[in-house]
Image: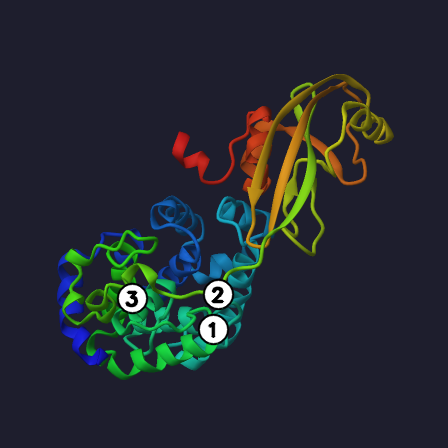
Amino acid sequence: MLKQIVKPLLSWYDGHARVLPWRENRHPYRVWVSEIMLQQTRVEAVKPFFERFIKALPDVKSLAECPEDELLKLWEGLGYYNRVRNMQKAAQTVMEQYDGAFPADYEKLLSLPGIGHYTAGAIGSIAFDIPMPAVDGNVLRVLARVKASYEDILKQSVKSSMEKEVRKIIPADRAGDFNQALIELGAIVCVPNGKARCGACPLAFCCMAREKGIVDELPKKKAKKERRLEQKTVLVLREGDRVGIRKRSAKGLLAGMYELPNLEGFLGENEVLEWIRKQGLSPLRILPLAGAKHIFSHVEWQMTGYAVSLEETEHMDRDGLFFTDAKETEEKYPIPAAFAAYARYMDIVLGQERYEER
């Protein structure tokens, strides 16, 4: 059944493919960087990150040798920081085992840290014309609708089955274009949440879901678990022109990133002032700040905050807390977007917002 989608899909892609910075050059490094960035992030949001990253780290060698803080700063705002750490591990492996050149072999690509079947298929097909599938959420949605399948696309068995079907039909002479065409169709035409543009779809002629009037019912996904809620009190600490930050633990959520000091639970002014004095600091003024929240994949932070002016004292490390110039903080230290609402009170703009406002 799926064999009939190949020609019309490629013909549509030839006339409708978006112009994207990572498509200007099919070098495997650029393909790889873009594919990792695009995981769970919108194309428009990725563009400035990709261009900045490639400018700073233009090749495998520069990524392999990049200091961690600088690397995390380049990734700031994209989230999922373990991905860029795995990218560096993979880059180091490519340098050590393949003399800095990505292997033109699907299994070898798959063996690199942080590279799964989708990413190996994307790099292999786009950069090396290896006829292997690159099946992501967009592709799963397109295929589920074309086949009118009610199978749960979050099940690995269903995804593996879809990959096998795509592998049977992927054209050897245009493997990369075919994979990108399927992804593109899901991204801009066969979209989710009742907004599918069936009238513009090159596969409308063979789409079983459209024929049966069930497009909006597909694909089927098992309901996700509810996120865990955590309450935090975030502190914007100022000593004159300097602001207070600290480094997070090397393990766990946002490992190794820098953060605004924060305490568990919603604390009152007196509790905050007591904690500050225990750090050997002398508060001058305290002001309550508006609440905020940040949603991770499995947890939601509900936050309240306080801005605290401190008496200037000798510069010293207090249980990981240190003070630095706000401009230096913005440019040098990777701070997760979870703190963006409070970083603004320090005249610091984080991640994606830095590109939107400047």
Residue drawn at 18 percent across, 62 percent down: 13
Cα separation, mark 2 vs mark 3, equals 18 Å
Q: Do the residues labelled 3 and 1 touch (CB within 8 Å)?
A: no
Residue that label 2 marks: 222
Residue 215 coordinates in the image, percent (x, y) = 28, 62
**Amino acid, disc 3:** Val
Cα separation, mark 3 vs mark 1, equals 16 Å
Work out whether residue 126 can be spotted. Answer: no
Callout 2: helix, strand or loop? loop
Q: Residues within 10 Å of mark 3 (few under 14, many from 20)?
A: many
Up the image or down, 119 lies above or below 23; here it is: below
Residue 109 coordinates in the image, percent (x, y) = 44, 75
Residue 63 coordinates in the image, percent (x, y) = 49, 58
Residue that label 1 marks: 155
Q: Which of 290 and 61 is in front in this view?
A: 290
Residue that label 3 marks: 142
